[in-house]
Image (tube, grey):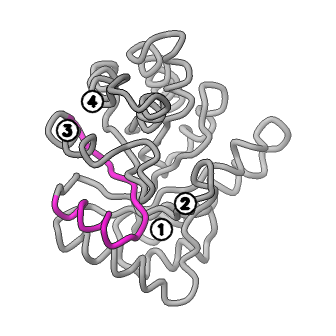
Amino acid sequence: MRLYVNIDHVATLREARQTDEPDPVRAADAAERAGADGITVHLREDRRHIQDADVRALKSSVRGVLNLELGAHDEIVRIACRLKPFQATLVPERRQEITTEGGLALRGPSRKVAAAARRLTDAGIRVSLFIDPDRATIDRAAQLGVPAIELHTGRYARTWKRSDAALRALARVAAHARSRGLAVHAGHGLTYENVQPVARIPEIEELNIGHSIVSNAVFWGMEEAVRRMRQLVDEARRL
């Protein structure tokens, strides 16, 4: 299973003082040394954390995969098409949200998402759609012709201590997505405590984890925080 580390909140800390540290590029380097398969960053329209210069620097420095999260905004899609990260994950985006609160709805014709996906694909970028774990939404994603989807694990992260219903739902829709020919990724709210049950779902091949790793890096250092998450994911797959 691939582990992609989201380093957005390294930039959040930097932007809190509008200074030059901590540096997301150094964080990405540490994450890769500790076993991350890829680095994920979200270039938001409001630029609240990751900046354009960060993406340019990461494109040059990341040794593995750079996964760029973005909303279907013309300006951001244009930047992605110019920089050509290996993967672009289209996500919903609202100015007032603290973090991404759900997946792309993909209701109706989904013209804006479909157009963005086409532009990114034409630029040679692998496209993934961040969606809720819902069969109908997965079917709509398959109809758009993208190769991959990322399942929003927020409901699981909120409820896993009380019920396994969200985990069972993730397993069902992951199997359905794979049956539709989609590569299955997952992320949002995953922590050192709750990651292993999701990592055991056989159809899920990639996890995107950020906040928990960056939070614990304050105490353990970035390399150790990634190393511990890598170990948990690998152990889950062996069980």
Between circles 4 and 1, the one closer to the viewer is 4
Circle 1 is placed at which residue position?
179
Which circle's residue, 2 or 4, is located before the other in the chain? 4
Which circle's residue, 3 or 2, is located before the other in the chain? 3
Which circle's residue, 3 or 1, is located before the other in the chain? 3
Circle 4 is placed at which residue position?
25
- Horizontal placement of 162 versus 49: left or right? right
Over which residues does the magenta segment extend? Answer: 62-82
Residues marked 1 and 2 touching at CB (< 8 Å): yes
Magenta span has 26?
no
Residues marked 3 and 2 touching at CB (< 8 Å): no
Using the image, determine if residue 95 lies above or below residue 208.
below
Percent from the top left, x then y, of residue 11?
41, 34
- Amino acid residing under circle 1: Ser
**CA–CA distance between discs 3 and 4?**
7 Å
Secondary element at tag 4: helix
Please tell me in which quadrant of the rendered image residue 234 appears.
top left
**CA–CA distance between discs 2 and 4?**
35 Å
Residue that lies at the very extreme toward the bottom in this rendered image = 109
**CA–CA distance between discs 3 and 2?**
37 Å
Query: In the picture, which quadrant includes the C terminus?
Result: top right
Residues marked 2 and 4 touching at CB (< 8 Å): no
Circle 2 is placed at which residue position?
175
Q: Residue at x 49, y 31 (%)?
A: 16
- Horizontal placement of 221 versus 24: left or right? right
